[in-house]
Amino acid sequence: MTDRTRTIALVAGAVFLLILVGLFAVRMTGGGAGNPDRLNDNQVADASNTQEPVKADNPARRCAGQANYDKIKRQLFDQAARTRGSDGDTFARLADVAVLRVDNPVLESEDQGLGLVRCAGQATLELPPGLQVAGGRTSLAAAIQYSLQAAADQTGDVLMVQNADAITVPLATLARAAGAPANTLPQAPPASPLGQPVAPSQPVTPTAPVAPSAPARPPVAAPPARPVPAPAATRPRTSNPSYPCASARTQGEQAVCRDDGLAALDRQMASVYGSAVADADDSQRYILRQTARRFYAFRDNCGSAACIAGAYRDRISEIRDIMNGDWTPPR
């Protein structure tokens, strides 16, 4: 091969190499005959970095909200009415006007498979004006727990309240405060007879001759007047505790018989105690009976309804501690 031929071959090879390099560069930059709407790899990466991530629902939000607090409030009044054993309709109306505040609601656990969350918070229930519980309190507070589970019919969450005895037990003793007006408790409006308004009376014009009146009869002597019962305020007041008030002997027993709220607490304590004794082993049963003597001695030495109410609440907690293994003997 001559030098001229070799030189031409080298130049041709160099030109071919430059053409290949140019085509490669064009392809890398997205030019040429390719689809101008197609993103290259760098553009795809940039687009994916600028896309906002989808935010998942925060389950802790289910623990808060006024709708949940209203459900909690209604359950507190419902449990109190069942503890009291009466006045369910009145307690339901009071639930609509009482005020409940839940501070620091937190998520304790979550079961995604069941759609269930368990929450806790500090609940404070403010009673309507003119009402109080045994001991004179007008607000009740407790650290409560509550669970929320999605309803099967997709209508919202089903809520259940736990650990609310510190509110529901004294709430069962709800009564009017001294000096409060008699209409403090909401009452259902009375219905007119047969649901119809009473029409004013109209004069009646006789259309037939009036028969002659019968001869007058001699006046009949009025029956002797019966003794008028004493007003309710002056009659001795008797409540309905777990024992017959006719046999009340101690100062504490007599005080409970004079107070509906204390009587409700006594019934609640007696129910908790009876269930505990039925489920207790020999050691627990011995402790329950020994501590019962101390409780009654303390109650009977109280000088006020507030002291007695506090003694009952403490006794209910003590019984549960004994059954849960959390009780420690006093020193």
Image: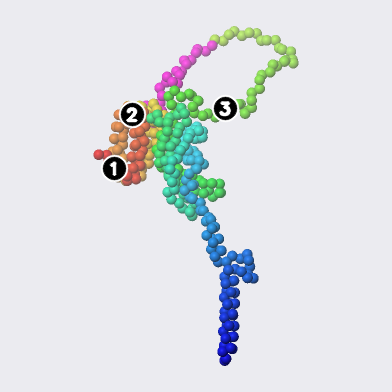
Q: Earlier in the sequence, mark 2 or mark 3?
A: 3
| Segment tinted magenta in the rendering | 222-247
Kind of residue at disc 3: Pro
- Disc 1: which residue: 328
Q: Decide: few, some or many residues near mark 2? Use Cα within 10 Å; few <14, some 14-19, many ≥20.
A: many
Which residue lies at the image location 51% right of the left edge and 49% below the top edge? 150
Disc number at residue 190?
A: 3
Question: Label 2, label 3: how many angstroms apart (C-alpha)?
Answer: 40 Å
Is 32 located above or below residue 298 in the figure? Answer: below
Question: Label 3, label 1: how many angstroms apart (C-alpha)?
Answer: 54 Å
Kind of residue at disc 2: Gly
- Disc 2: which residue: 252
In the displayed image of the protein, which residue is found farthest to the front?
4
Q: Decide: few, some or many residues near mark 3? Use Cα within 10 Å; few <14, some 14-19, many ≥20.
A: few
Residue 216, image quadrant: top right
Kind of residue at disc 1: Thr
Does any portion of residue 273 appear in the rendered image? Answer: no
Which residue lies at the image location 61% right of the left edge and 66% below the top edge? 38
Q: Is mark 1 on a helix, strand or loop?
A: loop
Left or right of 277 on screen, residue 184? right
